[in-house]
């Protein structure tokens, strides 16, 4: 026979009070409620502020005085939830209704003859099928009224092994190293042999004219492939003196300057139509 924890002790404590098969059903339900952390505070429907002082795991006095309707009150151990249990006998069926805090309800029904044998005054022979009672109680009462709803977790694991897209250490733990442009003067706090220790990613943004490592992204009007130190052609014609300070970033305008060091291929290398037609 399946067992309900504490039922044998409870049954033997109230053995002399048991009058009917339905009393055995109530004793079993009482133990199931106690095993869920509740305590009984008496009979009747009215709760009071003094109930917590009289809470017990025992069945109260006169618990089975009415053989047709059983009314018992229970509270959680923290006394923050109140459960009103009303069990009504209707022929061979017992209808069990539970009200939580006056706003949530659950109900189950049980066949008296299927649960309890005719030899109901002895614990060893009183119960026929406690498994079905436990299963229905767990599904229709505990899960509806006593189990807290699960909250889906939104946090993500920071373990590198569980993240197939992560490469290297977490950004939180990676020390921040400022990027050093490729060329600094001697008075720079980064000067003194640090060049080359950092990747050149973004160097064209930091050195548009390409003076440090070559390959700048802006055309320098004073430098068309000639080493620094002066350009034989000077600044583009037509600009006032001093309009382009030495070393300034400059975006040229107008047609390119012709000369022996101009870039190739010549964007104007195509001859105009009929250029060599002398006939």
Image (cartoon, helix red, strand yellow):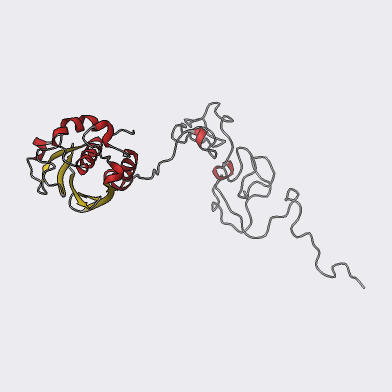
Q: Nearer the viewer, residue 127 or 271?
A: 127
Q: Quadrant of the N terminus?
A: top left
| 18 left or right, relative to 167 | left
Q: Residue at x 55, y 51 (%)?
A: 244
- In the image: residue 263, left or right of residue 203: right
Residue 6 visible from this viewpoint: no
Q: Position of residue 132 (x, y in %)?
A: 34, 42
Residue most extreme to the front: 118
Front position in the image: 246 or 224 = 224
The x and y percentages for residue 188 are: 48, 32
Q: Position of residue 35 (x, y in %)?
A: 25, 35
Is the residue 198 above or below the residue 93 in the image?
above
Rendered image quadrant of residue 2: top left
The answer to whether residue 75 of the structure is visible from this angle is yes
62 is higher (above) or lower (below) than 270 = above
Residue 156 placement, left or right of 131: right
Name, please, the residue furthest toward the right.
279
Quadrant placement of the C terminus: bottom right
**Location of residue 219 with respect to 119 vertically, above or below:** below
Q: Residue at x 57, y 30 (%)?
A: 195
User: Which residue of the protein is positioned furthest toward the bottom in this rendering?
Assistant: 279
Q: Nearer the viewer, residue 138 or 67?
A: 67
Q: Relative to residue 279, is residue 242 drawn left or right?
A: left
Residue 136 at x, y percent in the picture: 32, 45
């Amino acid at each position: 026979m399946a067992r309900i924890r504490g039922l044998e002790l409870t049954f033997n404590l109230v053995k002399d009070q048991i009058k009917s098969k339905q009393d055995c059903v109530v004793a079993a339900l009482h133990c199931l409620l106690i095993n869920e952390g509740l305590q009984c505070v008496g009979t009747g429907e009215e709760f009071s502020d003094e109930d917590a002082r009289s809470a017990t795991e025992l069945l109260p006095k006169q618990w089975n005085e009415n053989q047709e309707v059983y009314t018992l009150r229970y509270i959680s151990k923290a006394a923050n939830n109140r459960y009103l249990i009303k069990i009504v006998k209707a022929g061979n069926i017992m209808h069990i209704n539970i009200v939580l805090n006056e706003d949530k309800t659950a109900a189950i029904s049980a066949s008296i003859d299927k649960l309890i044998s005719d030899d109901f005054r002895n614990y060893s022979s009183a119960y026929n099928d406690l498994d079905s009672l436990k299963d229905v109680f767990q599904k229709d009462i505990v899960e509806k009224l006593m189990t807290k709803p699960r909250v889906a977790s939104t946090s993500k694991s920071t373990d590198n092994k569980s993240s197939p897209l992560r490469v290297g250490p977490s950004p939180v733990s990676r020390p921040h190293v400022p990027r050093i442009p490729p060329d600094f003067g001697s008075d720079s706090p980064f000067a003194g042999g640090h060049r080359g220790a950092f990747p050149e990613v973004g160097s064209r943004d930091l050195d548009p004219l390409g003076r440090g490592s070559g390959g700048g992204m802006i055309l320098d009007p004073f430098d068309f492939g000639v080493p620094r130190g002066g350009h034989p052609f000077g600044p583009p014609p037509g600009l006032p003196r001093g309009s382009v300070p030495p070393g300034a970033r400059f975006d040229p305008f107008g047609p390119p300057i012709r000369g022996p060091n101009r870039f190739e291929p010549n964007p104007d290398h195509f001859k105009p139509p009929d250029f060599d037609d002398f006939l």
